Amino acid sequence: MKYYLGIDVGGTKTHALIADEHGTVRGFGAAGPGNHEGVGYDGLATAMQASLQAALAQAHISLSEIAGAGFGIAGYDFPSERQPTLDAIATLGLDCPVEAVNDVVIGLIAGASHGWGVVVDAGTGCNVRGRTADGREGWVTGCGSLFGEYGGAGDIVFRAVQAISHHWSRRGPATALSEAFIRKVGASSLTDLIEGLALQKYHIHGEYARLVFEVASSGDAVAQEVIRWIATELGETTNAVIRQIDIQNQTFEVVLIGSVFNGGPLFTRPLQETILSFAPGATFTRLTTPPVVGGVLLGMEVAGLCTDERRSHLIESTHAYQVLWK
């Protein structure tokens, strides 16, 4: 029997999953953060090793029985990071084909029915990656507003604060966002809110995006425009990736990942409209499978195994481990 390994490395946790050649899950392991931007490459290696050993122990197999391994690595964004990433993977001692990709790519592999298409990640920040059936890739930096890539919860809050400031200065219309943020931070007035934000007396973060959605849902036109603008921007970034891999005239899947999509049609409708205006064959699906499943599929793929025959069983087999993904 041959076994395949997937490891999903994130900024807060690391997951390892082992499945056999039929796609049946045999072992799972978890460890702490592994993004090298936070813990360094030594920390990356440590997190991967800890999760791997836990998965091996649960699977009751040895390292030598792993026939292929796929890694989704948070913080692996640029070509210059490939070699140090592979060096960290080499410390695991695997004697099999391996492949490493950005962590959102294994979400695409897990979520798309044939493992290719486009993935849009909208959490605190945002990222978009694309992958064709023949292996061509499209990508953006994932580094946010510095490069004009908007789409995460932090961007929604940033844009909302601009709208509140415009309300205060009378550059723009009044908005219920102002009163909502005043109450949220405990400010005494709109001027106190603006001053407190400027002097860092009040601190806001991506979680405040929920408040923006609440105000928008109540009918506030400014809050609705904040969300529409961010969603449209994310749609244009997605179109850029679609353009890179030249699939705008094909039928393909767009896999949606991240908490911002919980905002519903206020966000998803303008996003989808923007994408469909450029790529009318796009279809949309939320990722419901743990991304580490995509790592296992990538491991199978790099080892030459046909994943289409095993995908459904592998996904079904992970249901028994559902409590462990949290």
Image (cartoon, rainbow, N blue to C red):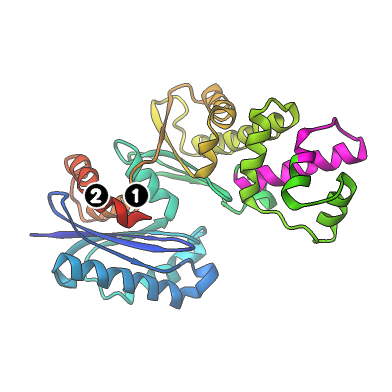
Q: Residues within 10 Å of mark 1 (few under 14, many from 20)?
A: many
Q: Position of residue 6 (x, y in %)?
A: 29, 58
Magenta-tinted stretch: 152-179
Which quadrant of the rendered structure holds the C terminus? bottom left
- Out of 110 and 251, give the one closest to the viewer: 110
* Residue 149 part of the magenta segment: no
For disc 2, the neighbor class at 10 Å (few under 14, some 14 to 19, many from 20) is: many
Quarter assignment of residue 59: bottom left
Numbered badge on residue 290: 1
Q: Are marks 1 and 2 in contact (CB under 8 Å)?
A: yes
- Left or right of 151 on screen, residue 79: left
- Depth check, front residue: 78 or 222: 222
* Label 1 vs 2, first from the N-terminus: 1
Query: Relative to residue 25, is residue 225 drawn left or right?
Result: right
Residue 43: x and y, percent?
Answer: 45, 75
Q: Nearer the viewer, residue 21 or 164?
A: 164
Tell me the residue at 81%/55% (across/down): 197
